[in-house]
Amino acid sequence: MAEAPTHIETAAENPTLIKPAVQNLLIEPLQAASVVLSLPGVKVFNSADPIIVPTLTTQDTNPGWFGQGELITPNPDVDFGELSLMPTDMASLKTISVVSNELIRQANAVNIEAVLRAKLVGDVTNKLDNVLLLGDGAPTASGAKTPRGLLAQEGTQVVKADPTSPDGLLAGVAAMAAKEVKPTVALMNGQDFFKMAGLKDADGRYLVQPDATRAMGYTLHGVSITVSNKVPAGTLALVDASNVAIVRDLNSEVTILKEAYADRDSTGIRVVTRYDLGLLRPEAVLLVKAA
C-alpha cells in the first residue's frame, strides 16, 4: 500500500504563527550612541527662560603684605562677565510623522504607533546630540538661533600634534594643565582611536588600557577615552565636563495628534526638544589636530 505523502506546513497556511517574528525583525537602523548628552559631570539647568551665569574675569586681585597700621593699597577693580544661554529666540528641534489609522489597526503584529514614537524620539535625540557636539550656531531660515556645539565654542584652544598618538594626547593634557584645567574625558573618532589602541610599549603591552569603571571604556595618561564616529577624524577633543553647561527646556516631548489629522483618518506623532550649550570656561575644551 502506497505511503501517504507528508504534509509540510507553510507560512502561507499559518500566517498567525509568524506574527511574533514580525516584531523581532523590525530593526531600526544603527545609530551612534550619544556623546554630549552622556558626558558624566556636565552641569544641566532646566529652564525655558534665558539663563545668565556670572563669570569672574579678573585673573588676580594681587593681594600684598602690609605691616601693623600700614595703609592697604587698593587692588585693581574686579571685572565680571556673563555667559548667556537659552535666548528667547533659540529654535526648537521638531518633527511630525503621520500614519493612517488603517495601518495602525491592520499591523496587529507590531505596535506601529509605539515603534514610530520611539523611532522619532531616537532620531531627534541623535540629531540634537550631533548639534550639541558640532553645531556652528548658524541661524535658521527664519533667523532663530541654534546651539553652538561643544567642539565649535569660541575661545577653544588648538594644539598642533598627532591626534592618533599618545604623545599628541599628552601634548593636549600639558596645554590644559598650563591653564590650570584637567580634562575628564577625551573624545576620539573610531578610526583614530584604534590606530592609537594598537600601539605597544617595548615589552609588548598596549599603551591604551581598559577602564574597569566603564563598559568598553579605555584610559590613557589618566584620561578616560570616549570613542564615537560623530567626532571628526583627525581631531582629538579633551574636555573638562564639569565646565560644560547644558540648558534643557524640553526633553523630547511627545504629543499624539489624533484630531489634527482626523479628516484624513490618520494620527500624527510630534516630537519637540529644545536645548542650549555653553562653556563656563573656554579653557574647558582643547582640540588636538595634526600640524
Image (cartoon, rainbow, N blue to C red):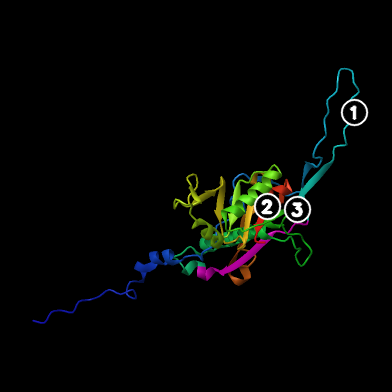
Which badge, 1 or 2, comes first in the chain's sequence? 1
Q: Is residue 137 visible?
A: yes
Q: Residue at x 77, y 47 (%)?
A: 83
Q: Residues within 10 Å of mark 1 (few under 14, many from 20)?
A: few
Viewport quadrant of the C terminus: bottom right
Q: Residues within 10 Å of mark 3 (few under 14, many from 20)?
A: few
Would residue 98 be counted in the magenta stretch? Answer: yes
Q: Residue at x 54, y 49 (%)?
A: 220
Q: Which residue is mark 1?
A: 73
Start-end of magenta stretch = 89-103
Q: Amino acid at mark 3?
A: Gly
Tell me the CA gap for discs 1 and 2.
Answer: 38 Å
Which badge, 1 or 3, comes first in the chain's sequence? 1
Q: Is residue 246 visible?
A: no
Relative height, residue 69 to residue 107 (above, below): above
**Residue closest to the eye, 161 or 147:** 161
